[in-house]
Image (cartoon, rainbow, N blue to C red):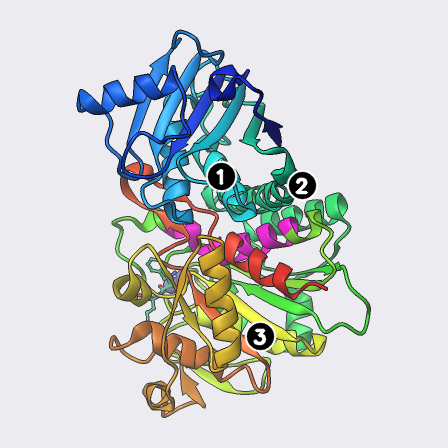
Amino acid sequence: MDFKTQVAGSAGLAGVAADALVVLVGGQAVPEDLATPLADVLSTAAKDGDFAFKAGHTLYAHRVAGAKAARVVFVSTGDGSGKNLRKAMVAAMAPLKAGGTKTLAVALAGAGAWSAAAAEALVGAVAEATYLYRETKPSAAPASKLATVSLVCAKGDAAVLAAGLRRGEAVAAGSNLARECANRPGNHCTPSFLAEQAKKLGKEHGLKVEVLDRKDCEKLGMGSFLAVAQGSDEPLKFIVARWNGAGKADAPVVLVGKGITFDTGGISLKPAAEMDEMKYDMGGAASVLGTLKAVASMKAKVNLIGIIPSCENMPGGRAVKPGDVVKSLSGQTIEVLNTDAEGRLILCDALTYAERFKPAVVIDIATLTGACVIALGHHRSGLFSPDDALAAELLAAGELALDPAWRMPLDDEYDEALKSHYADMGNVGGRAGGSITAAMFLKRFTGKLNWAHLDIAGTAWKSGQAKGATGRPVPLLTHFVLARAS
Ligand code: BES
Ligand code: MN
Ligand code: ZN
């Protein structure tokens, strides 16, 4: 899909040539800058009670006399915020994505001029609206025919908007890669599959990719990661992918993604209901691959390293058992009190491994706790960091990218729950504050690192009718990394 700008001619929006025209309507009444015949259609519909000036409300009009585009969709953007613009565009796409629309023009009415951020939000909305998982479903609807989307703008705005579109396309490509990986069933998306995806990405975008196997991890002493992997016959992979966009002396941003390709809970087995959704437990890993793709495709002048510890969590004959004590790469020992708290067990060794890169910052991303879903629901990811400046930077990136997070506490008092009789720590801290004690566990492995943790258990996928991976938090991470590029 191609995104570009188009300058409206003297005939105004009615003269815009495209298979379909989406008019994003701002304000509480028919916009004054909307001319006949489109203004008449909208005001009649509003009078008839068929259009409301509320974000996401749409009106479809076919073959409006005097309009060049065969299809016109009016959609209200409400207060015109980025969030509502995105919501409006997703709604406007509903009647267009399955039809004959190949070229689409999008215009603003009653909402001032386009901004780069609005252009970027629009690309994200179109990508979200047209994405459909088909890999293992031959009967899925055919791919949308939509080939070009152009923003109708003033001549002087084209260059700024082009930059917004370019960023939007990079983020969308990264989000779609994350969605494609995470939507794949566990028997397709294995640790080996993720390693292949990383290598493919390396070839496409010039990343250096290294994949460690079990023997390598044994030699290094990743006893904690190995303990999770040992219950499964599927070989583990420890993936390291590097984008060198800046000078050698530039300390890298390191992203660590949880890559559990299926989480049964292990011996502390999960209940059967909805266990299929544990194929998404590699959403953190998927977001690391997606962010690498977005950042590398923009050729950003930044050094970015993705680390993905990947395995299954299975209750095999050699599986780690409750009460087992394992030795992490850091040398600290862990009593595995609950084998279902496996994410932290693989991440802790990856965090220790990250130290060797002398990173400027390390962010781990994980579908880590059900408790985070209880705390924050499905809208905001949980953000944990002892560093106020880093937390603020990540929160700001999330707001700009329309991929928001919310900061959670890391007071020392929460650490007490991790005390163990038999090891330096236990791997669980009871039900109270479960997402925080999980973060406190990770914190024990971050030493002097400038570190943040994103718990995406509630945001990486949707359940129910619209079941599927969201590609989050690729937008947040990409914004964060690009803001650090020189
Ligand atoms: N992958 C799960 C977390 C999860 C649960 C994500 C539900 C999305 C939805 C994680 O490995 C897990 O099982 N966590 C346990 C931790 C507990 C045993 C301390 C949990 O949240 O129940
Ligand atoms: Mn688990
Ligand atoms: Zn898990």
Which amino acid, mark 2? Ala
Residue 33 drawn at (x, y percent): 42, 30
Find disc 3 in the rendering and name its residue.
351
Task: Residue 483: give x, y in percent of width and height.
Answer: 62, 62
Q: Nearer the viewer, residue 148 or 99?
A: 148
Q: What residue is drawn where x is 49% and y is 54%?
A: 401
Quarter-of-image position of residue 242: bottom right
Can residue 439 be seen in the rendering of this structure?
yes
Mark before the other along the chain sequence, 1 or 3: 1
Q: Amino acid at mark 3?
A: Leu
| Residue at position x 53%, y 87% in the image | 332
Q: CA distance from mark 2 to mark 3?
A: 41 Å
In the rendered image, the vertical position of residue 385 relative to residue 89, given as above or below: below
Residue 338: x, y in percent? 35, 73
Three-letter amino acid code at disc 1? Leu
Left or right placement of residue 353 versus residue 130 in this view: right
Q: Is residue 281 magenta?
A: yes
Residue under label 2, please give it. Answer: 159
Q: Is residue 141 left or right of residue 3?
A: left
Single out the mark in the foreground, 2 or 3.
2
Q: Residues within 10 Å of mark 1 (few under 14, many from 20)?
A: many
Q: Which residue is mark 1?
A: 122
Q: Which mark is residue 28?
A: none
User: Does 59 appear above or below 440?
Assistant: above
Magenta segment, which residues?
Answer: 278-294
Q: Residues within 10 Å of mark 2 (few under 14, many from 20)?
A: few
Judged from the image, the secondary structure of the residue bearing numbered disc 2 is helix
Residue 3 visible in image: no
